[in-house]
Image (spheres, rainbow, N blue to C red):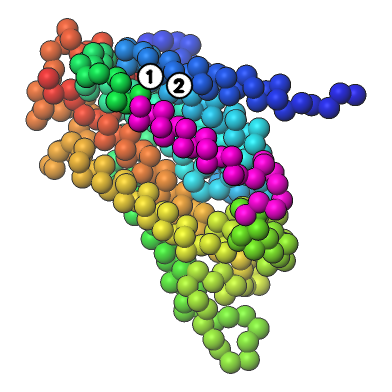
Amino acid sequence: MIDFQPWILEIPILALLAVTAVAVARIRDLWAAVMFTGIYSFLGASWMLILDAPDVAFTEAAVGAGISTVLLLGTLALTGKKEKPSTTSPLMPLVVVTVTGAALIYGTLDMPSFGDPNAPVHQYPNPGFVEKSLHDMHGLPNVVTSVLAGYRGYDTLGETAVIFTAGIAVLLILRPNKTDDFPSQTNSKSIPKPKPNVSSKRRKGGRK
Amino acid sequence: MISFPIIRVVSKLLIPYILLFALYVQFHGDFGPGGGFQAGVIFASAIVLYAMVFGLPAAYEVAPPKVIEKLVAVGLLLYAGTGFASLFLPRPNQDVPVTGNFLEYEVFQHNLLPGILPTGQHLGIFLVELGVGITVTAVMIIIFYAFAGRERVA
């Protein structure tokens, strides 16, 4: 029996990630760019699944490929679907990106190889967490959950507060109206309807 | 979108299962991969799908913005409230009554229906994850409403 070789999936997914990233950067049609970012997130989720991180894969698939794509489409429905052609020279950004990329790749040379048990990330915090979790948590087998909500419960409270703050901030900026909150399309009196010939198609597209 | 029969029928079939899967990820998060963050996002994506297919007014009836707005705070309050509750409850198996620390779930030890109701650490994690799930769901839905509810100002 032949063992499953991870590279059979890894190489195509990483190659597709690179292709998608270039496509997002090159393409001028913003609808297509948004769809490509969704594909990029989905490939990222598949990649996380190969790396044995199903929690992250869940989140990436739902947030990256799902909700953020919808939010970007919603934004495009409010703005426009074509990117303005750039007037500045692409030389400077290219230099910045190349230098940053080279620095990052140089940084990876010192990193321990994937799955190395002696890597700092596996030595700190104390690996004892994994051993004592089952006893401390009265038999809860998922160490990720017990670290997230048990040992590091205070941090997670902070994370939840961050999400709460983000929601409040978006509401403060984008909430439609003080008196008539969240008008539906049928009964919005305060905001004048846009010209139908330009925008109705776009709005419809945005709410696919 | 409601005029496209395939989209309408397929999403009507899928939405209950997406919701069910979100609840599974939420309440099975102690045993398998998942937890409040993932479950909240999955639950919200079901509502977003519903809003996209059947229109915002229909979604407002399923998940009224006024309720969702309040749920944003309810989840965080549930989380913080669990922490404060543990400040005032006595630690189990102590001769002198000592109250617990912030978010110390040991104090939720009880003997009500053992094996059915979660207790101690399990109950604490359950409540905390529920709080996370509620906040994440509500924030995702409210952000979507904020974007989709705006008219184009040309």
According to the picture, the residue beneath numbered tag 2 turns out to be A21
Q: Looking at the image, which residue is at 26% across and 35% down?
A: B146
Q: Is residue B60 left or right of residue B94?
A: left
User: In terms of image quadrants, where is residue A31?
Assistant: top left
Residue type at numbered disc 1: Ala
Say which of A96 and A187 sits in front.
Answer: A96
Residue type (three-letter) at the residue carrying disc 2 = Ala
Cβ atoms at labels 1 and 2 below 8 Å apart: yes
Q: Nearer the viewer, residue A208 or A121?
A: A121
Q: Can you say whether A123 is above or below B94 in the image? A: above
Question: What secondary structure is marked by label 2?
Answer: helix
Mark yes or no: residue A133 visible. Answer: no
Q: Chain of mark 2?
A: A
Q: Is residue B93 visible?
A: yes
Q: Which residue is mark 1?
A: A25
Check chain identity for marks 1 and 2: say if they share one: yes
Q: How many marks?
A: 2
Q: Is residue A106 magenta?
A: yes
Question: What percent of the width, then of the height, locates residue B83?
Answer: 46, 68
Location of residue B111 with respect to B78 vertically, above or below: below
Q: Residue at x 20, y 32 (%)?
A: A183
Where A136 sits versus A45, above or below? below
Q: Secondary structure at mark 1?
A: helix
- Mark 1 crowdedness (10 Å alpha carbons): few <14, some 14-19, many ≥20: few
Q: Quadrant of the N terminus of chain A?
A: top right
Asked whether B92 falls inside the magenta stretch, the response is: no
Q: Which residues are magenta?
A: A95-120
Q: Residue at x 60, y 72 (%)?
A: B106
Horizontal side of A82 relative to A33 (left or right) equals: left
Q: Quadrant of the C terminus of chain A?
A: top left
- Residue at (38%, 39%) from the top-left corner? B140
